[in-house]
Image: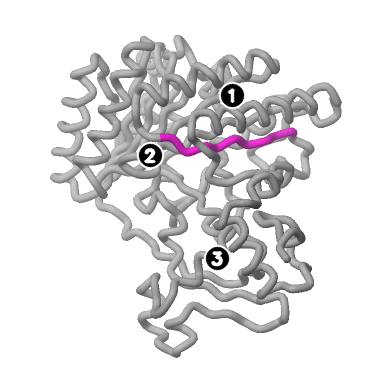
Amino acid sequence: VPTTGAGPSCSILGNALERGYGITPISDHFLSLISLEVVLADGSIYESPFKAFQAYEVSALSKWGIGPYIDGIFTQSNFGIVTKITLCLAKKKECIELFMFPIYETENFKKTIPVIRALKQSLGGIIGGINLMNDERMEAMFGKDNVKSSPTWTGLGALYGPPGLVKEAKKIVSEKLKRVGITPRFINQKRIDLIKKIEQRCPQFVRNYFSNNIKLLNAAQKFYQVLNGKPSKVALPLAYLKNVVKPDFNCDVNPALDGCGLIWFSPLLPIKAETVSLYIKQVYEICKRNDIAPLITLTTVSENCFNSTIPILFQKEEPDEKVRAKKCYKEFLSMGENMGIIPYRINIDSMGLFEENQHLTSVQLIGKIKQILDPNNILSPGRYNIVNHID
């Protein structure tokens, strides 16, 4: 399953419609969406073309259908209510190998960026998405007690395929990273199970062995759940970082219902060392000005492009923190505009982006489609369009 990092209770349908992504084999979750069914504002039902033409078997196999591709307009839009989707699943691989690598020097970080691109280009479907998380992000997710001698950045990825193929891919990963002075650590389910057995008998040995790394036992197990298509709560503690009262993460948790203050900034940027370095430098400066923790992740969404996610965390009951959080987000947007990068999705408070750019043909066309499909503007007014401003 194209699993999200948002936890077991979040909608896979919703994530695919928001064009989310992950680190599983089908990392672009919209690509895994083959067909859909939509209730339109007038009550009529839209079906993807092959299904509408009663070609039922291929409707679950072929994404693009026949004629102009219409399904895409129901992503990140307010053109209809999607009630059903067909998702393409990835066949479970014989072997899944997780790899992690520390980056301690800034110069090494710059050198690692083109290596990551080269790995994605050379290994193709064998390698999933590669994550880079700064030390603040790692501590926010796993807690300071679980991160010792934290490197400046931690890389994480996975290899999928037959054992022989994965074995050769491991050599390529090791060779390319060692050229920039980085030694990756590989771990699979058998190794996790073995370490758990050793920990039960010799806990001090295990603690000493992993003294300069994350406590990989729990972290690797949680990541493995995601890699195997099982949703995990591994990232949920992040949302509660500013909350005074922390929940029991062994139970069901819901950041929205629990009053977590969180705004996501998620721009796309090229996998280029100069661009990424400038972006990170400016993120740190903006966060420092607004007293916001710079919790940065970079994830490959292709061999050419990173998506960066930065959670802007604040206490909802503190008015000053709300103001700082919104100011920080606006500064991020301005920074992105100056750099030529833009978020791949935006929050409700930021729909003014379309208001400010209503002169663009693409924005005007969105408004015209909305007027045709929903002339009374009853579905999520103002979401990703400026319908009220189109004559």
**Distance of label 2 from label 1 (alpha carbons):** 25 Å
Residue at numbered disc 1: 140
**Amino acid beneath label 3:** Ile
Instruction: Specify which label sits upstream in the sequence, 3 or 2.
Output: 3
Tag 2: amino acid: Cys
Given residues 3 and 338, the one toward you in this image is 338
Q: Residue at x 16, y 32 (%)?
A: 172
Q: Name above or below for residue 81 compared with residue 133.
A: below
Give the side of residue 70 with respect to residue 202, left or right: right
Q: Is residue 49 magenta?
A: no
How far, Cα to Cα, is label 1 from label 3?
A: 36 Å
Range shown magenta: 261-269
Q: Residues within 10 Å of mark 1 (few under 14, many from 20)?
A: some
Please tell me which residue lies in front, 365 or 257. 365
- The quadrant of the picture occupied by the C terminus is bottom right
State whether residue 18 is above or below residue 85: above
* Residue bearing the label numbered 2: 305
Q: Nearer the viewer, mark 1 or mark 3?
A: 3
Crowding around mark 2 (Cα neighbors within 10 Å: few <14, some 14 to 19, many 20+) is: some
**43 left or right of 75?**
right
Q: Position of residue 126 (x, y in %)?
A: 24, 46
Question: Which numbered marker is on residue 326?
Answer: none
